[in-house]
Amino acid sequence: MYHEMTYSWPRQNHDMKNKNKYLSIGCVCLVVIVWLWLATPGVPPSHHSVVPKFPKFDPEFQNDAVRQRINELETEVQYLKATASNCRIHKLTLDPDLPVIYAITPTYARPVQKAELSRLSHTFMLVPNLHWIVVEDADDKTPLVANLLRKTDIPHTHLVAPTPQEWKRKEKEPNWKKPRGVLQRNKALEWLRNELSYDVTTDQGVVYFADDDNSYSLEIFDEMRKIKKVGVWPVGLVGGLMVEKPVLNKTTHKVAAFNSGWRPERPFPIDMAGFAINLGLLLDHPEAQFSLTVEGGYQESEILRHLVTREELEPLADYCTKVYVWHTRTEAPKLSGEMQLRKKGMRSDQDMEV
């Protein structure tokens, strides 16, 4: 009995150890199998562990899914429309049969700068064969202007020409007190004369001074492509009048006078937005540019006196009877609340480009 007992005990213990061993191995295998199953590519764990929030055939759930899909499709349609529009604009920009319009825009840092340049860029996106020359009144190119130009995809040249401090208008001085945009426009003219090799038999171009505080109808760009020397047209909302315009001789249809309400004795009493110059004519007259020393309001006369006489001006816009450009200067925003914030070391546009 004793022998049997001493024999059976080790055997029973040995069997128990084997059972525990097999059980442990089985548990490990099970864990490995489960882990491999959950980690299988294409079968995310969430598919096995997350219970849907709604019943599979809940009608309300089905309606939500349909609405979501409709929204996705509408978004795709809008994207395709925008892409197609961009393609059309790009195609227009490369039209080889139209004269190139070189639009010169002086600009300077101010609260409304990005808003006005954005509005102008959206017009220029619709104009074929336009090259935009933007000249900042700054020591260096600013990220705001550089980023805006890059995003427009308009053929452009970005330049800088700082105005000396003594020639800058003080905050409360009237606009006409100091010349504005003079060095910036001259910088653009310098770029044209240095960079363009003009052949009158093959090249056709027009130079237009397109300030960023004006509003432009697309018709004005179609009109200026006709210019042989200097074209002129009416400008709305300028000089204290509803419209300033050239007055034509009824027989010859040549410019006989101007209905300017301010300094009508000027040689060319016309707004900067009211004329454009043939590129070849401008390149042939390197002396034609603007000046810091002329009287206020005489910048237009200063450049035009080198190029044409009044009799040589070409009236456009249906013989100067249509208005296609307006001097809609943006009102300076009232930022008293912003100034109060900044006195406290805060600002509403923190980390934003407005």
Image (spheres, rainbow, N blue to C red):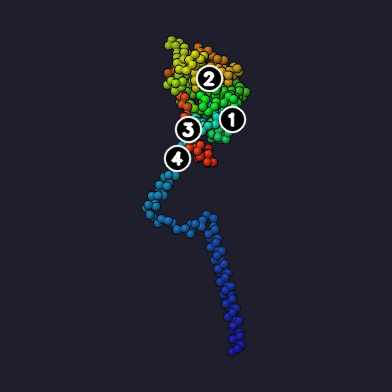
Answer left or right for 255 relative to 166: left
State which tag comes first along the sequence, 2 or 3. 2
What is the CA distance from the residue labelled 2 to the residue labelled 3? 25 Å
Residue 149 sits above or below residue 244 on the image: below
Label 2, residues with CA under 10 Å away: few <14, some 14-19, many ≥20: some
- Residue linked to disc 4: 77
What is the CA distance from the residue labelled 3 to the residue labelled 1? 22 Å
- Residue linked to disc 3: 333
Answer left or right for 299 relative to 64: right
Residue at left offset 51%, top offset 37% = 339
What is the CA distance from the residue labelled 2 to the residue labelled 1? 22 Å
Kind of element beneath mark 1: loop
Residue 6 sits above or below residue 275 on the image: below
- Residue linked to disc 2: 296
State which tag comes first along the sequence, 1 or 4. 4
State which tag comes first along the sequence, 2 or 1. 1
Kind of element beneath mark 3: loop
Q: Amino acid at mark 2?
A: Gly
What is the CA distance from the residue labelled 2 to the residue labelled 4? 52 Å
Q: Amino acid at mark 3?
A: Pro
What is the CA distance from the residue labelled 1 to the residue labelled 4? 42 Å
State which tag comes first along the sequence, 3 or 1. 1
- Residue linked to disc 1: 138
